[in-house]
Amino acid sequence: MKILTYEVDGRKKLGIWNRDETWIYPIESFGIEYKRMREVIQGISGSEIQLLNHMASKDPYEIRGAAPTKEAKILAPIQKPGHDVICLGINYMDHAQESARYQKEAFDGERPYAVYFSKRVNRCVGHNEGIPAHQDIVDSLDYEAELAVIIGKDARNVPREKARDYIFGYSVVNDVSARNIQTRHKQWYFGKSLDGFFPMGPCIVTAEEIPYPPRLSIRSYVNGELRQNSSTDLLIFDIDHVISELSQGMTLEAGTIIAMGTPAGAGMGFDPPRFLKPGDVVCCSIEKIGKINNPVV
């Protein structure tokens, strides 16, 4: 199922999309009373998931409170993460190459260990919501389309072969980055954590909807121009590796968001670089999940 957070008539709700995504059905209409997405992730039962999957195929006129998608404001599915987001750096080989080129560093083609970093997210940005340009401190605003993995139950010391059992679902994220701040401070936390730098959505697709491991096309566009075009099966370190490694000695709580890294085609990868400016519109898209559009403001 595709579960989302949305607003209609000034009221914020949790809902599911019907099969063609033209209508949103509020989960409260089915006697499921969670108020926030993190509560859903932490508490939803298998029978409730089965019920919602079944109801998604119903006619909208049978569902109390159903709203046409075009009349709803689509919010980030998780608006306030419980912890900082865990991100993978340079987790596609072609992006590792363009990153080294931008930094004017030699690249040996070796990636023996995953690169992890944290991204502070006070509030996730929703579909069609603006990305602030922060022009007072940023001169090289960049985009990165990424697959997000949402942990569904507390994970600790998870073996590779069990990693998939801990996944609630998947979403699309844009790991917006201020390259000048990244470079100046020689680490990524500040340059990736400015307010508004984490668009997410438009929904969470629950894990059973997508064959495992996910092999999905991932793309980004700027003003309609294709910039990134790759597949999630080209990850250097796959989901099994990441969940297993991170859970050794560190508990990944239910609701944890892991952004799996971006492929080549970010603005810094062009010669000369093609960074974002106010008025640009970025679209990040992943097959079977959806797309998020965000203007730079």
Image (cartoon, rainbow, N blue to C red):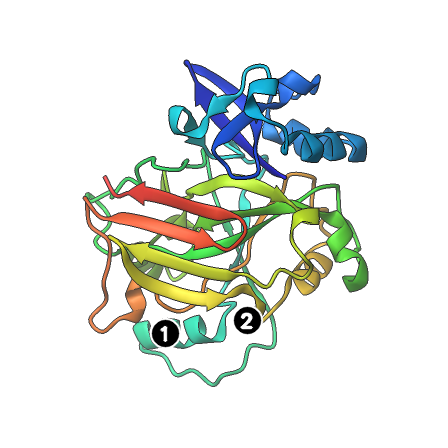
Which residue is at 69% across, 35% downward?
A: 53
Mark 2 Cα shell of 10 Å, populated few (<14), some (14-19), many (≥20): some
The residue under the point 69% across, 64% down is 241
Q: Earlier in the sequence, mark 1 or mark 2?
A: 1
Q: Evaluate if marks 1 and 2 touch, with contact meaning CB atoms under 8 Å apart.
A: no
Q: Is residue 248 above or below residue 137?
A: below
Q: Indicate whether 123 appears above or below 109.
A: above
Q: Nearer the viewer, mark 1 or mark 2?
A: 2
Q: Quadrant of the C terminus?
A: top left
Under circle 2, the secondary element is helix
Report which residue position mark 1 lands on: 98
Can you give x and y, in whole percent of width and height, for residue 157 in the image?
A: 80, 55
Where residue 126 sits, quadrant-wise, is top left
Q: Give the residue at mark 2.
A: 234
Amino acid of disc 1: Glu
Q: Position of residue 150 (x, y in %)?
A: 62, 45
Q: 207 left or right of 261?
A: right
Q: Which quadrant is the N terminus positioned in?
A: top right
Relative to 193, say whether 242 is above or below. Answer: below
